[in-house]
Image (cartoon, helix red, strand yellow):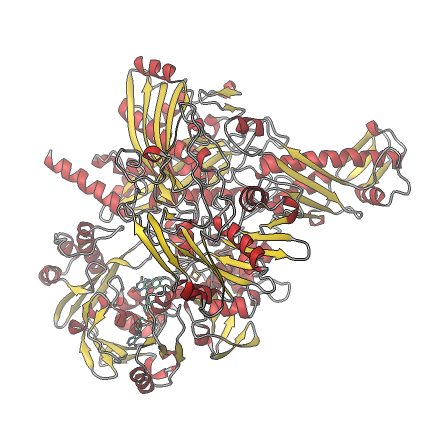
């Protein structure tokens, strides 16, 4: 079995995995980082989104071995102690979550979106969330949250 | 997913060597098509050769007036490249409409073209621009590349290294996305090039193809209305839950006219 | 109103854990020594199992056990509701074993349970199980299932009929039709939907050898119901030896109400293997096993007088149950559907016939709205069509037939008695908010841009706050539908609230904290809400049917009444006053007309440190439980208005405006209420425009079995919503609350379709079915213009 080594939320993590182990399985099962969720098996829902070297990706569609040597950020790594990341804060302020299952992926995608487009329009936000499905909120408040989060990240 | 051996070569030559040395090996690029396929246990390779560590396969270069894009360049990199936006804006537009941002952060030009999914976007650009597919063995003209559903001119062990797109005078792309999967139900790439008008259609047939009718109509008159008026036959077009062949035939004309309207 | 009291948009208490990845969903739970289950499922819609050979699989790496139907020695999954047919005979209730014994009846039916050290090993081994099937012809179509000569799902259910039921006065309805000036008729399909909560179902079974106690962690909306059904009926484990925990649950929408095979299997296997067993659905399995929704085929007729006043309504519906009866399936197309056919109108005579049929498809049961969206869709499509045929204004015909403001309580001809409502108020508010009056100029403007613009309306009612036990009992329910709540005041005055409802997105931890902190006058941070664990909560019926606040919240009010009554007696003792003179406000006890007072905290402490205490009259401690059984259903209602633009070139419908004005009774947290409406409307729009569960009619294969083909609403499919509440209070519960969980999904689909039809009406299009996909809209435009060309 190959050994993988990567930085996860700023800490070194290494383990032996099967070649077929998905990154999301590695995070959830080997590292106990269960904030990254699995909502589908066809790479559609985005519940599993994490950042690899600063880019948002679907961790269900990547092998753990492919992340060897990479720097991974998951939802657990965003807050600074008790202080939430501005995007997390914006989701709370705008009621951008209900059951919370899609939320980690939404937040991780939203941060990447804002990184590439610091002042997104509503339409750009909706387009940018195409890879994340939420069944609870109807997206109205998620869009509001991303907009507010973008403003907060700037300032 | 069945288990497999995993290899991450540092050069295209090493990758080719590994590929030749294993009997059921497969290349993995962005994995956006291959990994879901493996998860569904629809393929069972003995080994995966990951091209992710090969620097020479990445990057975008302006070359002889056109653009050369390394096989491992992600859709997101194409979408955001100022060189692409300047030289062939339609290509950046196309890239920005593939799947979703997360897919675009991993999926690659080479993977998409090698896969020849009937509903993929890039094949329309490759064909529409008359691009050249470069492999570790040769160069293949776009017109000779797409052979059928998931079928290309690539031989066993052949690796796409880059794709060269000549600069058109004007080009545009318009896609009608499948509402569920976001792949193309119909995508039409139009280009006015020094060698004439090229119109490539994806999503509608077994693989991307050129539409002679639309090329004819646009050669006479490069306007949206010229193609919108063309009534195409539905014979041989794909038909599924989301779109009948007749609907696709109609959409091809509509998307072609929108692509012309958007062409720059 | 205080910043955290009733009526304030308090930020949710649960959000911190969800936003930091620290929610604890069932698949996040791992027990020491845990093994993994994979379920081998039928690839056929209908087949006999001739032989199962597990020998190769048993010796595969990591395999611990393989069980098939032959090994399973416990009970089947029960139906929780009994319906009787017109002729008095009980519905056909086929056996529903967690593992099939000799026949599979839908693609995805459970054939073998494989347990291994890892999930991948279990799945690898399952590939080596050799099952010999003898394929049988399958019946899929709802409309055809009861026709003679079709494949039969169950030998006992002749013509695949589960029951043939009716409601209402047939003779009176016939008489109304006999004197009608005009009759409008409509045929409608309410298509099957897949709930697709984002968290796939999961279950972890555990068995403690030392105590003999079983624990099931499961993705459930109602852990006590699962304990009752699984304990009493399926595995025969008594309640005191069975704990069911529904931890954080990632959405339910009805699909996590029911008791599923996998829950029973992991619990059963954990007992046999003496190891914890985990099963987690892959999304593909969710498509094949989560109870699906809707699936009605209906014909309806509306009789009117010459002024468009409704005289009578006749409805006949065929409802698909799927291959088995899921837990609450029989009540959905009957008592949650036909009873709503009066809608918001005074139609004096109504007669409905409902036939439930079995098919070789996944079971159908309650999905957000359950029965009420089907009734609303039917009525609101019918009323629009009636207006067109009568050449009346769509709004006017509704106003003319609304139940008047002063007619409440209003007895409908289909069993329900509405306690309160004001349909004129919600209508007027929605017309104003949507600028209904200014629509024609927007239509003209759209036309200039080459777009077809349309506006549609739906005025709806629903019955929720489920439900008075005696009433539902008389209608066939095999359970009571009260709710239970406990208030535990701790010695320092903080409070733990135990509720039998379950929050899987609804924000109960916040809403109930607001209710309790406001009522008891204590800071909201001093209130903690506990739910979802049968070992912590005295009892509960769970969350569905928009019942949590109306029924669960009322139970908490009753429990708090008891707390305050007792606390007053303690306070009276401390202040040396008579109980009758003690008043309680803002967390302080006072004696009327004096300046004597004791704060909440002192009373709480005294209850637990009873040194100066009326110990001969009063027990120490301050904890009370109440069960609340509602007196009636609650009746939220309102008006939804949708505005669309159709691109005639592609058939794409874009929703450009959506307005919902709902009467939901008392609002505790407006932010949460709006969120519930947004989510419900999104699901309603999904049904109207995007979602469709399609089986191949021959093979019974699910053609929309993944998110690649089943179209879920995404951010760019939806608009921003204008939502508002315009409430009348529920008259029979202490909060005045009606419920908001389902209104969005109930009111919206007909508003959307009526808007699409309005947009297409200039072309002569008169009908379109849900979902109105681009393909269907284009086909409708195409054939209408072909017709025009031919004429
Ligand atoms: C949710 C989702 C939505 C999507 N939507 C779209 C869409 O709208 N439009 C669209 O066009 N695509 C879409 N895709 C597909 C996506 O663009 C993929 O990235 C692409 O098709 C494959 O690229 P890849 O780099 O991921 O290749 P991989 O999945 O790694 O490989 C695909 C195939 O190509 C072979 N291959 C890869 N690289 C090479 C090479 N250099 N030389 C030879 N063979 C090679 C592999 O062996 C494999 O057989 C979507 C994918 C997902 C998951
Ligand atoms: S789990 Fe659905 S996209 Fe990754
Ligand atoms: S909050 Fe439940 S899926 Fe998004």
Where B151 sits versus C17, above or below? below
Where A72 sits versus C140, above or below? below
Where C206 sits versus C658, above or below? below
Q: Is residue C12 left or right of residue B75?
A: right
Residue B140, position as x, y percentages in the image: 19, 78
Q: Is residue C74 left or right of residue C364?
A: right
Quadrant of the drawing holding the N terminus of chain C: top right
Quarter-of-image position of residue A125: bottom left
Q: Is residue C248 visible?
A: no
Residue C682, position as x, y percentages in the image: 42, 45
Give whichever of A61, C731 is nearer the camera: A61
Residue C153, position as x, y percentages in the image: 34, 41
- Ligand 1's quadrant: bottom left
Q: Is residue C709 visible?
A: yes
Residue C119, position as x, y percentages in the image: 48, 64
Q: Residue at x 37, y 24 (%)?
A: C396
Q: Residue at x 11, y 33 (%)?
A: C791
Give whichever of A68, A10 is nearer the camera: A68
Q: How many marks?
A: 0
Q: Is residue C781 left or right of residue A149?
A: left
Q: Is residue C139 left or right of residue C487?
A: left
Give whichever of C390, B8 is nearer the camera: B8
């Amino acid at each position: 079995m190959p050994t993988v080594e990567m930085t996860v939320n700023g800490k070194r993590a290494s383990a032996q995995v099967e070649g077929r182990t998905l990154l999301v399985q590695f995070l959830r099962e080997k590292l106990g980082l269960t904030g990254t969720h699995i909502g589908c098996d066809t790479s559609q829902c985005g519940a599993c989104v994490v950042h690899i070297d600063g880019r948002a990706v679907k961790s269900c569609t990547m092998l753990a071995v492919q992340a060897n040597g990479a720097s991974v950020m998951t939802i657990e790594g965003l807050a600074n102690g008790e202080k939430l990341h501005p995007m997390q804060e914006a989701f709370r302020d705008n009621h951008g979550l209900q059951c919370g299952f899609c939320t980690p992926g939404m937040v991780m995608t939203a941060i990447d979106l804002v990184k590439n487009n610091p002042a997104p329009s509503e339409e750009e936000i909706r387009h940018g969330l195409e890879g994340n499905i939420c069944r609870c909120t109807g997206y109205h408040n998620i869009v509001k949250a991303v907009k507010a989060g973008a403003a907060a990240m700037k300032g | 997913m069945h288990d497999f051996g995993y290899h991450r070569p540092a050069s295209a030559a090493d990758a080719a060597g590994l590929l030749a040395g294993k009997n059921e090996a497969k290349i993995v690029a962005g994995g956006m098509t291959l990994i879901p396929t493996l998860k569904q246990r629809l393929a069972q390779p003995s080994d995966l050769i990951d091209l992710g560590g090969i620097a020479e396969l990445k990057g975008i270069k302006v070359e002889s007036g056109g653009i050369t894009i390394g096989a491992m360049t992600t859709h997101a990199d194409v979408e955001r490249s100022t060189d692409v936006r300047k030289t062939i804006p339609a290509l950046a537009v196309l890239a920005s409409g593939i799947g979703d941002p997360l897919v675009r952060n991993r999926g690659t030009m080479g993977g998409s073209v090698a896969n020849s999914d009937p509903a993929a976007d890039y094949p329309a650009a490759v064909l529409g621009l008359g691009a050249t597919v470069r492999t570790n063995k040769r160069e293949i003209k776009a017109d000779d590349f797409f052979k059928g559903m998931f079928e290309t001119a690539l031989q066993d062990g052949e690796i796409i290294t880059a794709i060269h797109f000549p600069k058109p005078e004007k080009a545009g792309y318009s896609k009608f996305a499948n509402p569920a999967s976001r792949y193309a139900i119909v995508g039409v790439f139009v280009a006015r090039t020094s060698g004439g008008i090229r119109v490539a259609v994806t999503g509608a047939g077994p693989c991307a193809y050129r539409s002679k009718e639309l090329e004819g109509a646009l050669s006479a008159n490069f306007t949206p209305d010229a193609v919108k008026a063309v009534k195409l036959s539905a014979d041989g077009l794909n038909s599924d839950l989301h779109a009948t062949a007749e609907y696709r035939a109609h959409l091809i004309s509509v998307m072609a006219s929108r692509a012309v309207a958007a062409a720059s | 109103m205080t910043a955290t009291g009733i009526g304030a948009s308090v930020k949710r208490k649960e959000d911190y854990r969800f936003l930091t990845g620290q929610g604890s969903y069932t698949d996040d739970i791992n027990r020491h020594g845990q093994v993994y289950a994979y379920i081998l499922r039928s690839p056929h819609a209908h087949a006999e199992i001739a032989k199962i050979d597990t020998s190769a699989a048993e010796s595969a790496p990591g395999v611990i056990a393989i069980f098939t139907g032959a090994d399973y020695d416990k009970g089947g999954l029960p139906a929780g509701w009994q319906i009787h047919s017109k002729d008095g005979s009980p519905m056909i209730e086929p056996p529903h074993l967690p593992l099939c014994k000799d026949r599979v009846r839908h693609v995805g039916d459970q054939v073998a349970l494989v347990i291994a050290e890892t999930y991948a090993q279990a799945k690898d081994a399952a590939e080596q199980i050799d099952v010999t099937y003898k394929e049988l012809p399958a019946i899929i179509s709802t409309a055809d299932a009861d026709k003679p000569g079709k494949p039969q799902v169950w030998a006992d259910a002749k013509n695949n009929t589960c029951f043939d039921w009716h409601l209402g006065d047939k003779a009176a309805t016939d008489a109304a039709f006999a004197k009608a000036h005009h009759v409008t008729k409509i045929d409608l399909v309410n298509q099957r939907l897949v709930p697709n909560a984002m968290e796939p179902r999961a279950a972890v079974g555990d068995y403690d050898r030392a105590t003999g106690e079983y624990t099931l962690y499961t993705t459930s909306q109602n852990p006590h119901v699962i304990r009752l059904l699984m304990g009493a009926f399926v595995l025969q484990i008594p309640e005191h030896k069975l704990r069911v925990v529904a931890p954080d649950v990632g959405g339910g929408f009805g699909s996590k109400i029911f008791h599923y095979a996998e829950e029973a299997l992991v619990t059963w296997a954990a007992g046999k293997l003496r190891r914890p067993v985990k099963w987690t659905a892959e999304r593909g399995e969710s498509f094949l096993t989560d109870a699906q929704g809707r699936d009605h085929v209906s014909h309806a007729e509306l009789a009117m007088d010459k002024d468009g006043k409704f005289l009578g309504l006749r409805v006949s519906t065929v409802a698909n149950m799927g291959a088995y009866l899921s837990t609450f399936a029989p009540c959905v197309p009957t008592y949650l559907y036909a009873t709503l056919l009066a809608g918001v109108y005074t139609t004096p005579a109504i007669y409905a016939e409902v036939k439930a049929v079995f098919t070789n498809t996944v079971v159908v049961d309650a999905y957000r709205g359950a029965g009420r969206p089907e009734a609303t869709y039917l009525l609101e499509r019918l009323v629009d069509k009636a207006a067109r045929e009568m050449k009346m204004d769509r709004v006017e015909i509704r106003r003319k037939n609304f139940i008047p403001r002063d007619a409440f309580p209003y007895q409908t001809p289909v069993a329900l008695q509405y306690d309160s409502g004001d349909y004129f108020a919600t209508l007027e508010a929605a017309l104003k908010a949507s600028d209904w009056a200014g629509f024609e100029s927007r239509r003209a403007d759209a036309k200039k841009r080459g777009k077809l613009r349309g506006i549609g309306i739906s005025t709806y009612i629903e019955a929720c706050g489920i439900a008075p036990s005696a009433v539902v009992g008389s209608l066939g329910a095999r359970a009571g539908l009260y709710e239970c709540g406990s208030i535990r005041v701790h010695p320092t005055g903080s409070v733990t609230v135990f509720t039998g409802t379950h929050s899987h997105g609804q924000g109960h931890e916040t809403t109930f904290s607001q209710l309790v902190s406001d009522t008891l006058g204590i800071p909201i941070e001093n209130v903690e809400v506990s739910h979802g664990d049968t070992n912590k909560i005295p009892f509960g019926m769970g969350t569905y049917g928009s019942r949590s606040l109306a029924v669960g919240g009322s139970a908490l009010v009753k429990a708090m009444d008891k707390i305050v009554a007792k606390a007053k007696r303690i306070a009276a003792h401390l202040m040396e006053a008579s109980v009758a003179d003690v008043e309680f406000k803002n967390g302080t006890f006072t004696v009327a007309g004096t300046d004597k007072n004791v704060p909440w905290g002192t009373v709480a402490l005294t209850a637990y440190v009873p040194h100066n205490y009326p110990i001969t009259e009063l027990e120490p401690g301050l904890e009370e439980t109440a069960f609340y059984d509602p007196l009636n259903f609650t009746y939220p209602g309102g008006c939804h208005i949708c505005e669309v633009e159709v691109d005639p070139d592609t058939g794409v419908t874009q929703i450009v405006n959506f307005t919902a004005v709902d009467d939901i009774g008392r609002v505790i947290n407006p932010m949460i209420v709006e969120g519930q409406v947004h989510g419900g409307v999104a699901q309603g729009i999904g049904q109207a425009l995007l979602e469709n569960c399609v089986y191949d009619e021959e093979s019974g294969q699910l053609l929309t079995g993944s998110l690649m083909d089943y179209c879920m609403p995404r951010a760019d499919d939806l608009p921003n919503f204008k939502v508002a509440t315009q409430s009348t209070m529920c008259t029979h519960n202490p909060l005045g609350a009606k419920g908001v969980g389902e209104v969005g999904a109930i009111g919206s689909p007909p508003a959307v379709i009526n808007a699409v039809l309005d947009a297409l009406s200039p072309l002569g299009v008169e009908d379109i079915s849900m979902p109105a996909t681009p393909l269907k809209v284009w086909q409708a435009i195409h054939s209408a213009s072909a017709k025009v060309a031919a004429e």
